[in-house]
Structure formats: C-alpha cells, structure tokens
Amino acid sequence: MRYILLTLCFTSMFSFSQDAIKKTDNLWVQDFDKAMHIADTKGKSILMYFTGSDWCTPCIMLKEDFFNTKKFKEYKSSYVFLVVDIPRNQDLLTDQQRKHNYKLLEKYNKDKSFPLVTILSPKGKLLDEVSGYNSLRDPKYYFELLEKFEK
C-alpha cells in the first residue's frame, strides 16, 4: 500500500512539473537561442520566466493566477515567452537542458530569485523585471510589466 501511495505521489509531482514547462498553445520555448532568433526576426521582446516548477510554491501560485489566465494569453502576440525551469528533481530535465537553464540563471538571475519574470529586448538586453509573489495572490505588477513593454 505504501509503495502504491508513493508511486502515485511521484507520478503526480512529475506530471505537474512537466506541465509547468511544456509548451501550451506553442506559447513557450525552452531554448534561449531560439527565443532570441524569434524575437529578433519578429521585433518582439522576450518574457523570460524563472521557475522552480516542483518546489517553488510562489511559482505555482503565479502560474495559476497569472500565466494560466485568459488575460495573460492576450499578450501572446506581443512577446516571445521563454521558460527557465530549475527543478529540484534533476530527472525532470535532460542534462543538456539543465546546463542551459543554469547558464541563464547565472547570467539573468544572479540573486536566484523565484519566481522571476524578466523582459529582454530582442537583442538580449535586460529591460525590467519583477520578482517574487506573495500570499495576497495579486498579479497586477506582472500585468503592469507586460503592459509597459507591449508592442
């Protein structure tokens, strides 16, 4: 019985973590070079989201209150969306993806703040960022960030 319960818990954790980083409506990319190419080609800014999909409670709340909303999806034509997942469960990413994400963490999230949403220019210059999310669950600062750089 304990084995079955443990298996179910692990399976649900793995499913949730994968859901946090999978492409939804082809909205999210996971490769920085690909995001830069799209941004440069289309003249869009990049919204880069640092998350700890399997351990960061504020990240999970932000996903529900901000990223999973109809209002957020209205911005899909204005940005290139790049997710940088730093899960504790190392099996959730390939070795290559993990190395890629940690390089981005070192360059764009030196304080290792989670969640962190940054806006980059099409050339990769940091324009602005919003970090953290609290129990009041008010995503207004994140929407203000999107509105500030919407094209």
Image: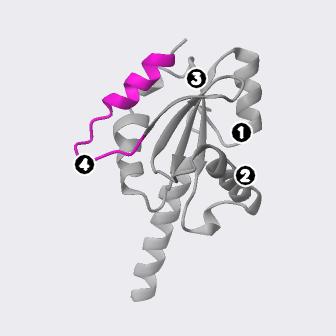
Label 1 sits on residue? 32
Query: In the image, which residues are magenta?
Result: 131-149
| Label 4 element class | loop
- Mark 4–mark 2 Cα distance, whole angstroms, equals 31 Å
Q: Amino acid at mark 1?
A: Phe
- Mark 2–mark 3 Cα distance, whole angstroms, equals 21 Å
Label 3 sits on residue? 79
Q: Amino acid at mark 2?
A: His
Residues at discs 4 and 2 in contact (Cβ within 8 Å): no
Label 2 sits on residue? 100
- Residue 27: x percent and y percent? 59, 31
Q: Amino acid at mark 3?
A: Tyr
In the displayed structure, does residue 133 sit left or right of residue 49?
left
- Mark 4–mark 1 Cα distance, whole angstroms, equals 30 Å
115 or 71: nearer the viewer: 115
Q: Amino acid at mark 4?
A: Ser
Instruction: Say whether disc 4 or disc 2 marks the residue closer to the N-terminus.
Output: 2
- Mark 2–mark 1 Cα distance, whole angstroms, equals 8 Å
Name the residue located 43 percent from the left edge and 27 percent from the top edge: 72
Residues at discs 2 and 1 in contact (Cβ within 8 Å): yes
Tell me the crowding category of disc 4: few under 14, some 14 to 19, or many 20 or more residues within 10 angstroms, Cα based.
few
Q: Seen from this angle, which residue lies furthest front? A: 111
- Mark 3–mark 4 Cα distance, whole angstroms, equals 27 Å
- Mark 1–mark 3 Cα distance, whole angstroms, equals 14 Å
**Residue 70 visible from this viewpoint:** no
Name the residue located 40 percent from the left edge and 88 percent from the top edge: 2
Image quarter of the C terminus: top right
The correct choice, above or below, for 146 with respect to 130 in the image is above
**Residue 69 visible from this viewpoint:** yes
- Residue 42: x percent and y percent? 71, 16
| Label 3 element class | strand
Label 4 sits on residue? 135
